[in-house]
Amino acid sequence: MKSIWKKFASVAIAASLAGAWSVGEKADEQPSVIAVTHGQASDPFWSIVKNGMMQAGKDSNVRVDYRAPETFDMVAMAQLIEAAVNQSPAGIVISNPDPDALGPAIEKAVAAGIPVISMNSGIASAEKLGIRLHVGQDELPAGVKVGEKLKSLGMKHVLCVNQEVGNAALDQRCAGTEKGFEGGKVTILPTTTEPSEIEAKIQAALTSDPSIDLVLGLSAPLVGERAVAVAEKMGNGDKVKVASYDLSAGFLQAIADGKAVFAVDQQPYLQGYLPVTFLALNSRYGTIPAGNVASGPSFVEKDTAAQVIEKSSQGIR
């Protein structure tokens, strides 16, 4: 009888050790995560997103491959997503500025059994496309909060400068601002990402319509800083205020110096870091959050700008 129990115990211990080894081996594996976004890593905002992804890769022992088209090109981006699907990674992270254009490519990934997490843009279509969850800022409600804040500051006429018309997230920012800015006027100014064009169009708009009392950028480094420069050049910084979505060291300094009123922080570092971390955990342990994760909005104003500048210059805020 003792020999039978001894044999049974030996088998049980061996099975237990085998299970432990399999878990350990699984945990030690290095999954591959492919990120496909509409923003080039050379862009100040997207460089922060990439920094977050790369740090998450180091912290979670994941190989991260960041890909983006050379310009805002949905056809090229869809092709990059399809190419990622063909590599069968442990997960794909995508931004989704145009769900209609990118939807079929995303659905191919989902159909292939590859978990997909969206970030930054596309929250409204995430569930419909089979995306596991979204990490980012819900842009329409964020815009409403911005509009309400501008109204509380006494603004009357806002110039919303959109450097990527057709990008659903940016369009929603202007639309949300208009909705929250009840009783005031919002004029949308379309531009490209070319700095000289942005400055020229802002200056022309302010010259032709003196009723504009605030310029709202949808990107601090691309538009917010340009708007501050124009207001200074025109000598009407006291009359025309500047605010912007997102952060940059230069725009934060403008806030600290009183040349801009606030920035809207959606925490791009988190938008990059969290999806990679979630996909690593999902690959190893089958765990993943059950819902979307809001990374913003929060407002950075004069009393807090100085605290954020250092981290912004490090590519974290």
Image (cartoon, rainbow, N blue to C red):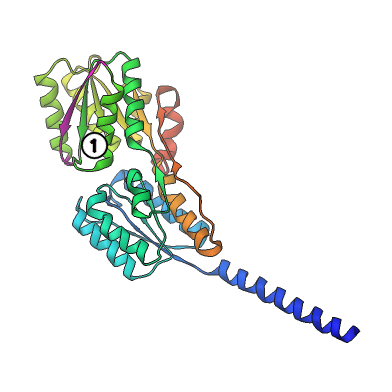
Say which element carries label 1: helix
Q: Quadrant of the C terminus?
A: top left
Residue 255 in magenta stretch: no
Point out residue 136 in the picture as x, y percentages from the top left corner. Answer: 39, 43
Nearest the camera: 97 or 131? Answer: 131
Residue furthest toward the right? 2
Q: Looking at the image, which residue is at 34% across and 50% down? A: 128
The boundaries of the magenta stretch are: 183-194
Point out residue 268 in the picture as x, y percentages from the top left corner. Answer: 39, 43
Q: Looking at the image, which residue is at 26% across and 59% down? A: 104
Does residue 315 appear anywhere in the picture?
no
Quarter of the figure with residue 81: bottom left
Circle 1 is placed at which residue position?
171
Residue 191 in magenta stretch: yes
From this view, report whether residue 190 is shown above or below residue 84: above
Q: Looking at the image, which residue is at 40% across and 23% down? A: 302
From this view, report whether residue 273 is shown above or below residue 81: above
Nearest the camera: 254 or 112? Answer: 112
From this view, report whether residue 308 is shown above or below residue 215: below
Q: Looking at the image, which residue is at 67% across and 71% down? A: 20
Point out residue 258 in the picture as x, y percentages from the top left corner. Answer: 34, 20
Residue 312 shown left or right of residue 106 in the figure: right
Quarter of the figure with residue 24: bottom right
Does residue 186 appear anywhere in the picture?
yes
